[in-house]
Amino acid sequence: MSVDTSVAVGAMNLRGPVLAASGTFGYGTEVPLLERRALGAMVSKGIFLRPREGTAPPRIAETPSGMLNAIGLQGPGADGLVRDYAPLWAEWDFPVLVNINGESASEYGELTARLDGVPGIAGFEINISCPNVEQGGMFFGNDPRAAAAVTEAVRKRTKLPVWVKLTPMVSDIGVIARAVESAGADALCAINTFVGMSIDLNAYRPRLSFRTGGLSGPAIRPLAVHLAHQAARAVHIPVIGIGGIARVEDALEFLVAGCSAVQVGTATFVNPKAIAEVHDGIASFLEARGFKSLAELPRYLPRD
Amino acid sequence: MPGGLTLYALDAPVTGKRQVARGMFVIGMRAPEIAATVHAGQFVNLGWAGGPLLRRPFSVYRAEGEEIEVVLKAVGAGTSQMLAMEVGDRLSCLGPLGRGFDFSGGARDAVLVSGGLGVAPMLLAARDARAARMRVTWVHGARTAAELCAEKDGDSVVWATDDGSQGIRGTAVAAAPDAELVIACGPNRMLAAAAGRWPNAQVAVETYMGCGTGVCLGCAVPLQRGGYDRACTEGPVYRAADIDWTALPSHLSYAVVA
């Protein structure tokens, strides 16, 4: 017997609920040893309209059960992405969404217009939550009006699915979630990294050259489950859970807490097969519990 | 430069451990596919149950039969755990990774310059240089005699210590003769000095590393022409003059994590 693990995220049908998180899967060509059959979708490395060098090293620091990163959205810009990667994606049997970034709502809109309709690009994940850029990024994510303005700017330029990746650095994620839902988002991704800092006791200064970085990994998982759950309670669009997922049980926590799908991120750095193991584990769990499909999985989602 | 086209994720049992200098150890593991394919200067990314979150990158020190070896010092909780492992304990071994040294240039002689743990890729470098018919000079430096790696491989050998307790007093870079091919590995400060003397030297740099496979962009190496590339993928071996040494962190500080 085979279990049906397909999910619908808005109008987008995915063959499985486990997705590759932005920035942890490059442009889909780098991660070795991954069995692609297990990928529900991939969100590509965050991109700006123009190429970016990224931040000076050191860019990463390990912390207990987690890591800080300040990569600074190094990337080739829209033209490079369209030229070098989208043609590959057009041949793949799973959808690729592009994580989009800007320093103003109009720049997000301009980037969307540049990418909309390019074969290989199946949708957009709006990044209003990157803690590692001087302009834009998280600024948009912790103000409901700014978050809605960016979402509207993107929504106006495309009919493709628009997901919005939320920052945890807010006092009430439900407020932001409802604001971007009203502005036309098709789904929410919760959450991006927490802002953290670690000090080098030999140098008496931060371990990262950017001073702060985004904290990811198992250290943030209970925080992320809670915030994804809070977001899911607040809206009627699907929520994709992200934060410290490394094993099947971690993914199932997010799904039971009200998420439609999950993204695996930092775990891929450690275990290039993590996505496949989580995907296969979900199918085994459902089968062992006597469910015929992921849709039958009980959810804990009291409504606000 | 040689780089692996094929990558392996192996469950690698520890086969042995020996001390080669004060605080410096060699750990062997069974990793047949990697042993058969690794080039000098390439590395493996090691993880283990109960270990730190991220894997730890190690140059492959020796590859013989079905075994590879890595060299390490206890600098943090992770390496301390590795040193506490016993024969038969399991390492998760991902590799071979990165691009190694290039011996195809037709040089007739090579000088292998290492400082401290920078000895890590040099046994394989000596093997590969000799296979390319080069005469090999082994130059190894440390702070003091007790910290010099006892194992060596060269047609001639030069020792250097900061305190003069063995060999030439001074740095390995200062002690080394010139050669048609210069290969260097050690602290980034030492490599910057090597770059000043030999712009065309091939140097293996050390950076913090996240994934080791080219995805996370955490191991950024600043380039003279501007921008960054990845130590794990385009590196860890570079032409010395191609690196912007003023922007590469000169000292890596390993915080204690578990």
Image (cartoon, grey):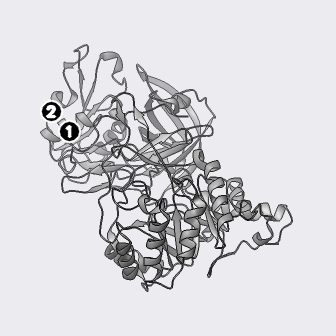
Q: Residue A225 appears in which quarter of the rendering?
A: bottom right
Question: Real-space Cα distance between discs 2 and 1?
Answer: 17 Å
Residue topped by disc 1: B192
Residue topped by disc 2: B177
**Mark 1: few, some, or many residues within 10 Å (few <14, many ≥20)?**
many
Label 2 marks a residue whose chain is B
SS assignment at label 1: helix
Residue at point 52% right, 30% down? Answer: B77
Considering only vertical position in the picture, is B100 above or below A64? below
The C terminus of chain A is located in which quarter? bottom right
**In the image, are marks 2 and 1 on the same chain?**
yes
Q: Is residue A29 visible?
A: no
Q: Is residue B95 visible?
A: yes
Residue A45 percent across, percent down from the top left:
44, 65
SS assignment at label 2: loop
Residue A34 percent across, percent down from the top left:
56, 63
Is B35 displayed left or right of A252 in the figure? Answer: left
Residue positioned most to the top: B165
User: What amino acid is labelled 2 in the image?
Assistant: Pro
Residue A299 percent across, percent down from the top left:
77, 63
Q: How many marks?
A: 2
Q: Residue B204 appears in which quarter of the rendering?
A: top left
**Mark 2: few, some, or many residues within 10 Å (few <14, many ≥20)?**
some
Answer whether labels 2 and 1 touch (C-beta < 8 Å).
Answer: no
Residue B1 percent across, percent down from the top left:
30, 55
User: What amino acid is labelled 1 in the image?
Assistant: Ala
Is A7 displayed left or right of B175 in the figure? Answer: right
